[in-house]
Image (cartoon, rainbow, N blue to C red):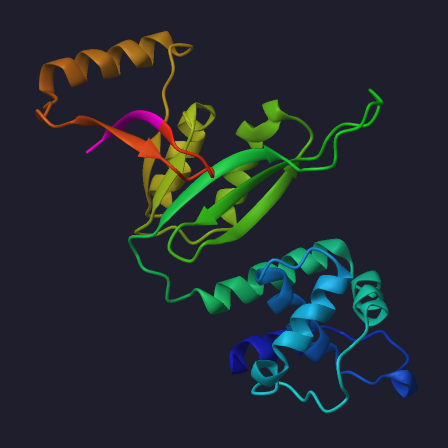
Amino acid sequence: MTEVLAFLSTVEDVREQDKIIYPLSSLLFMSICAIFCGAESWDDMVVFTESRKDWLSNYIDMSPGIPCYSTFRRVFSVIDPSSWSALIEGTLGIVIKERAPEDQIPIDGKTLRGTRCSSKEVRAIQMVSAWSVSNKISLADIRTDSKSNEIKAIPLLLDLLTVEGCTISIDAIGCQEEILKKIIEKGGDFVIGLKKNQPSLYQEVHDYSKEHGEKPCNLIEDAFDESHGRSVPGAFHD
């Protein structure tokens, strides 16, 4: 964590110095740790800091006490949103730099919950994010104007990632020459979806698989998927 704190200490503190109780690096450390643990509000950050005070005191000075929700809010207000993104991604880069080389990184686009609006002039927020399966945390994300812009956003997202030795998985929207070239150039492998809306490529892959592929006798079995809070019967690859 020493390296993380050193990184956070590089952020310029624009607050009035004679009114400071908590060092900026300490507040950033508490905030980012809370976010990594699922905090979604200022109150969540206060609760996290209270419950993890002993652990936090191993790395930062907790003698000033627990910051209130207004303190966390003010910290976020004085730092540019794009800087927050860089801070979180930089911290992630330090924390998971020893990531297993065989890590799988799914990339997918989602609509942020609660951003839909009845007004046609206000669009829901679309995000494309990369997820580390081994670390169970989002590595980076990019906002897009619409679902169709995911194709343009994915190469930009890949530029933010270290994917050497990792397997990138994307649904059929990622089946684009530019995206696959970038993954290969960065030393990664990929598993990409392919649909019939790319008929020539689909037929080539189908014919090749039919001629050269192997089909083990136990390829598919019936099982139950409980990953979404309910049991759903289905066929799963062995």
Q: Nearer the viewer, residue 221 or 231?
A: 231
Q: Residue at x 71, y 63 (%)?
A: 44
Residue 103: image location, x then y, percent: 34, 52
Residue 195: image location, x then y, percent: 38, 15
Q: Is residue 65 left or right of residue 55?
A: right
Q: Residue at x 65, y 70 (%)?
A: 48
Q: Is residue 152 left or right of residue 204?
A: right
The outermost residue toward the bottom is 63
Q: Nearer the viewer, residue 102 or 162?
A: 102
Magenta span has 237? Answer: yes
Report the magenta stretch's main SS. strand
Residue 124 position by quadrant: top right
120 lies above or below 49: above
Instruction: Say whether residue 176 is visible.
Output: no
92 lies above or below 187: below
Instruction: Say whether residue 52 is visible.
Output: yes
Q: Residue at x 27, y 9 (%)?
A: 203
Q: Nearer the viewer, residue 172 or 48?
A: 48
The outermost residue toward the front is 231
Residue 178 position by quadrant: top left
Q: Residue at x 78, y 77 (%)?
A: 67
Q: Which residues are magenta?
A: 233-238
Q: Quadrant of the C terminus?
A: top left
Residue 18: image location, x then y, percent: 91, 87
**Number of marks in the image?**
0
Magenta span has 207? Answer: no
Q: Is residue 225 left or right of residue 161?
A: left
